[in-house]
Amino acid sequence: MLLPPFDHQGRMLRGNLHGHCDHSDGVLSAQQVTATYRRLGYDFTCLADHLWSDSSYAATSVNDTRHLDSDDFVTIISAELHCPGKSIDSHGLWHIVANGLPLDFAMASENETGPQMVQRALDAGAFVTSAHPEWYSLTSDEAASIAHAHAVEIYNHTSTIRAARGSGVATADYLLNCGHRALLTASDDSHFAVDDAGGGWVMVAATLDQAEIITALKAGRYYSSSGATINEIELNGDRVTITCSPAHSVVISGAGHQARAEVGTNITKASFDLGNFKSDWFRVTIVGAAGCAWSNPYWLADYR
Ligand SMILES: [Zn+2]
Ligand SMILES: [Zn+2]
């Protein structure tokens, strides 16, 4: 059987879940940001401007981008939520991306905790992601405290090119190893101070509608990319087969250090026997010359 999102009939939508404009600390206007993503061939983008009281980089209201929507491109009402209580970070603030927020979603109070803010965003109906864990040294305890969020940003493009700390793989795998059903996202976190658009995105199995996209994201019906393509992941019994853009490494990752890999040149199909794989779940990573692609985790019990 084809695993989601590859069982989807029709084209998948390309989108950026995390970016900024001059509503907060981005360089470009919302209109310019949207035009940039349209030009790059995206179907949707999220102006996830900082929602916090410090006017040097944040706004106190959610950015209303509905006027930028059209028949062939949509924006999703989003914000990067902040509140105090994060250790290590120089501002001491949590960074949580919420996609699909109501416009009247309120800025956190000084007393709200990170886990409470995540819950409030979930209650408001948003797809909630723990942003750039490596960039701001999210601790394992902090990650576990917000494990009720849907996803972990495992690739943040601007943190990769501007700070060389763009990964969230260790955080996501920590949560998976603890039994949490964490999804994975790749995003730009574009601010346009440098050329940081078009480096990390999601491919979503949905029609071009904000609510449909949010529903698909919550259900994990998407994969993430920084340049590679996954065409299909098929599971037949214990055998998983992946077809993808030309890769030099196709990797299956599971609990602990469980892994299977095919390594070579221009691999476009790889097949693995998971009969001996000592893990309840697996996820797929493609590594190619132009970047990576990451599936969401699959729990084998769901497909048996
Ligand atoms: Zn941030
Ligand atoms: Zn950001």
Image (tube, helix red, strand yellow):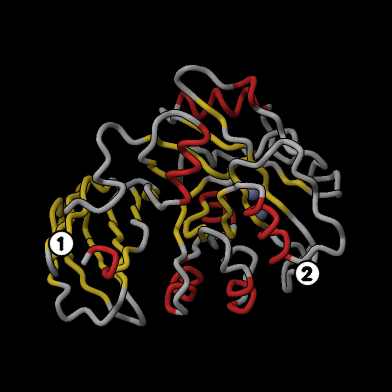
Q: What element carries label 1?
A: strand
The residue under the point 33% across, 81% down is: 257
The residue under the point 26% across, 67% down is: 252
Q: Residue 30: where, in percent of width, then height?
A: 66, 27
Which label was assigned to residue 264? 1
In this picture, is 152 found above or below 229? below
Q: In this view, does 222 lie to the left or right of 130?
A: left
- Nearer the observer, disc 2 or disc 1? 2
Q: In this view, does 239 lie to the left or right of 291?
A: left
Q: Which of 291 and 145 is in front in this view?
A: 145
Q: Which residue is disc 2 drawn over?
A: 85
Q: Is mark 2 on a helix, strand or loop?
A: loop
Which label was assigned to residue 222? none
Q: Which amino acid does label 2 sit on?
A: Gly
Q: Residue 221: where, in percent of width, then height?
A: 37, 48
For the N terminus, the quadrant is: bottom left
Q: Residues within 10 Å of mark 2 (few under 14, many from 20)?
A: some
Image quadrant assignment for residue 298: bottom left
Say if disc 1 is inside 8 Å of ligand 2: no
* Upstream in sequence: badge 2 or badge 1: 2
Image quadrant assignment for residue 94: bottom right
The residue under the point 28% across, 45% down is: 229
Q: Is residue 72 left or right of residue 4?
A: right
The residue under the point 25% across, 46% down is: 6
Q: How crowded is mark 1: few (under 14 residues within 10 Å), some or many (20 or more)?
A: few
For the C terminus, the quadrant is: bottom left
Q: Which amino acid does label 1 sit on?
A: Gly
